[in-house]
Image (cartoon, helix red, strand yellow):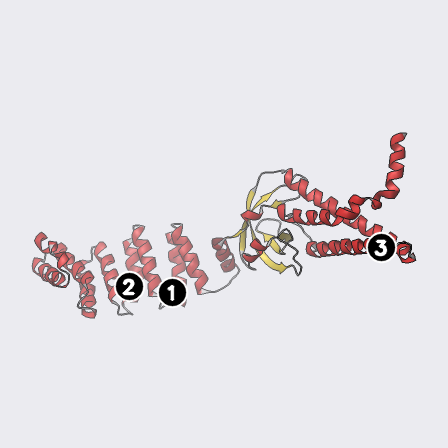
Amino acid sequence: MKLFGVLRNLIPNLFRWGLISRWLIALCLWAISMQLFYPVLSPWPIVGITNTIVMSLCFIVLLVRLAARFSPGKPIWIIAKPFLHLADAIALTYIVCGVGVYLNGALEGASAQTQYAEVLEVTEEPLRVGRWWPAGRVKLRFQDADSSPRYLVVNATVLERVLPGAVMRMWVYGGGLGLPWVESRSLASDSTATIAHLLSKGVDDSLLKKLNIRNDLRENHLKHAMEQSRQYFTQEPTDFYFAGEMALSAFRAGYPVQAVHIMEPFVEKYRSYKLYCLFASYLGKNGDTLKSIEYLKAAVGIDPDATEAYEMLGYAYKNQGDKEESKRAFTKLVQLEPGYAYVLKGL
């Protein structure tokens, strides 16, 4: 009976507690900060608006109560009292939601899963009170069966590195209350996935194709890279620097014939000392010594004082068995760079 008496006296005075009137704003701010500690993947985009409305109500209620304390007895405070209680109820509901977000993250359900999502939209919040206040929200579409958009509240650090159209990699937890949430520190743009996604959407950009080819080369997908390079060089027929990069990758992967095929259209079109020397080295590795010598002679004709071509030319003649021409090339090499005198002793 005594317990019922306490509760009967407690309920009418619930919103008169000093705890509620003094710490309501702090509790709402804590509830907002939980959105950054355990950001939930929400189907609703109104999180930021809700934060602003709740905090505005809290500050209005605080100001009204302060005014009522310093000027008691005015009829207007009696009229405003029900509205103050309504605002308190809204704030307490919001705080309960904040507790739910905290428990959902603290009582983790399933283990984290790495997922990829396309960034559809990035919205910056107009109001930022501090580091614990959300800086904005991101609209995402995950690359799985459920393609419905989700919204994620993020801090300023994450907001700075998120771009619309990019593909984000993240760790997604099941959540103790069944609400999936994302580890903020795991949010990062995945360049490989972004490039592949943009190309799959039909974005015809040569730079994207070039980056995608480099990703294939980095992952040793040489066959796919070669197929993509044909389309790229159709759009960019003058990029012989990238052709050299492609040829070098093919050569290092053990495909010198491919390296020659990549470089051949460019050496026929451009007159370049470095290009000729590089092409001659691939020809030599393929056993085509005569053609290699032709391009090395052409390289010497472009730059008669360059040592690289004379060194390669000397070894090319040596492998062919032509000691006189080999000696002539090495002699010129030593004249230009005396440090190569040992090559003549080798003859």
Residue nearest the viewer, comparing 96 with 264 = 96
State if disc 3 and disc 1 touch (CB < 8 Å).
no
Q: Hey, what amino acid is under mark 2?
A: Glu
Figure check: 10 above or below 69: above
Q: Which residue is drawn at 70% across and 55% down?
A: 46
Residue 291 visible here: no
Residue count near mark 2 (Cα–Cα under 10 Å), binned few <14, some 14–19, many ≥20:
few
Residue count near mark 1 (Cα–Cα under 10 Å), binned few <14, some 14–19, many ≥20:
some
Residue 276: horizontal and vertical position, in percent? 24, 64
Residue 295: name its quadrant.
bottom left
Q: Nearer the viewer, mark 2 or mark 3?
A: 3
Residue count near mark 3 (Cα–Cα under 10 Å), binned few <14, some 14–19, many ≥20:
few
Quadrant where the image shows the C terminus:
bottom left
State if disc 2 and disc 1 touch (CB < 8 Å).
no
- Mark 2 lies on a secondary structure that is helix
* Mark sitting earlier along the chain (1/3): 3
Figure check: 243 above or below 93: below
Residue nearest the viewer, comparing 240 with 183 = 183
Judge left or right: residue 322 versus residue 260. Answer: left
* Mark sitting earlier along the chain (1/2): 1
Residue 103: horizontal and vertical position, in percent? 68, 40
Quadrant where the image shows the N terminus:
top right
Q: Residue at x 63, y 52 (%)?
A: 152
Judge left or right: residue 64 versus residue 243. Answer: right
- Mark 3 lies on a secondary structure that is helix
Q: How far apart are marks 1 and 3 (CA)?
A: 79 Å
Q: Name the residue under label 2.
A: 264
Q: Name the residue under label 1.
A: 233
Q: Hey, what amino acid is under mark 3?
A: Phe
Q: Mark 3 points at which residue?
A: 70
